[in-house]
Image: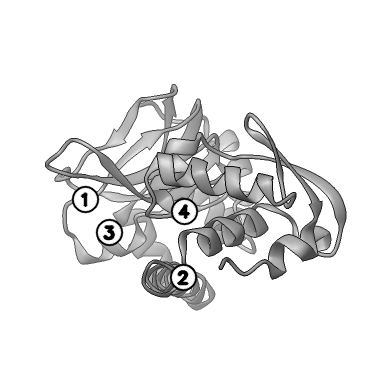
Amino acid sequence: MRDFQPVQVESLLSRIPLFEGLSPDELARMAKGVHEVRLTKGDMLFRHGDACTGFHVLVYGQIKLALSSAQGTDKVVEIIQPGQSFGEAIMFMEKPYFVFAQALSDSLVLHVSRAAIYQELQNDHAFVRKMMAGMAMRMHQLMTDVEAYSLHSGTQRVIHFLMHELPESQWGAENVALELSSNKGVIASRLNLTQEHFSRILHDLSSLGLIIVEGKRIRIPSVPKLQKHQPA
């Protein structure tokens, strides 16, 4: 881990949604508490039980947050995409990490120290609201996940995932294509499915003509038809 040059950090921070609206002076102050972490695919950012000294923002790449079971399998809790922050709640609780974070592709992560955040929270009420809103959205997503695992079939979960991968502007479109953001094993774990079950659902949807699977690329002949599909 090494420091960015200040001008680089400030430029990167200014493009992250959480830090939008901060003045140049505020960005410069925040940059003093930021370090970069460059990861290659498969590298661990932190492990279960590690001390949390701040939170992270993903600049580029992809990070999975996951739990390890006694059987050695991973349960993916979340897949972090560029621009997202993570670890805020644990930072405020001052508890060790209860998940591990691993790079799914070459990634650049910013670590923002707890001290820098606490200083900014004292100075900027708008920043407080942004952080609270971000954590509230994360909690809402977790509750949505619990609802899906409890009440929705595996097929419904997969369709919802595919819809989420598409921009809303394409939800009424015909003949669209998307690239799966992660490998099928990671996505299956994120949806609380086995990889075999996930592959079987894709096969069933393909047999119905609702999707066409081409490796990591999935073509959808009619997005509205896929969205309306109710499994028997």
Left or right: residue 15 compared with residue 194: right
Asked if the residue under mark 2 is in contact with the one under mark 3, i.e. CB atoms within 8 Å, the reply is no
Q: Residues within 10 Å of mark 2 (few under 14, many from 20)?
A: some
Left or right: residue 167 compared with residue 46: right
Mark 2 = which residue? 152
Q: Residues within 10 Å of mark 1 (few under 14, many from 20)?
A: some
Disc 4 or disc 2, which is closer to the eye? Answer: 2
Mark 4 = which residue? 85
Mark 3 = which residue? 91
Q: Is residue 137 above or below residue 102?
A: below
Secondary structure at badge 2 equals loop
CA gap between label 3 and label 4 equals 12 Å
Counting residues from the start of the chain, the first of labels 4 and 2 encountered is: 4
Answer whether residue 78 is visible to the viewer in this image.
yes
| Residue 123 location (% of width, % of height) | 44, 71
Q: Amino acid at mark 4?
A: Ser
Disc 2 or disc 1, which is closer to the eye? Answer: 2
Disc 3 or disc 1, which is closer to the eye? Answer: 1
Residue found at x 17% / y 44%: 69
Q: Residues within 10 Å of mark 3 (few under 14, many from 20)?
A: some
| Residue 184 location (% of width, % of height) | 49, 37
Left or right: residue 16 compared with residue 120: right
CA gap between label 3 and label 2 equals 32 Å
CA gap between label 3 and label 1 equals 9 Å
Disc 3 or disc 2, which is closer to the eye? Answer: 2
Q: Amino acid at mark 1?
A: Tyr
Residue toward you, 150 or 106: 150
Residue found at x 21% / y 66%: 93
Residue toward you, 95 or 104: 104
Mark 1 = which residue? 97
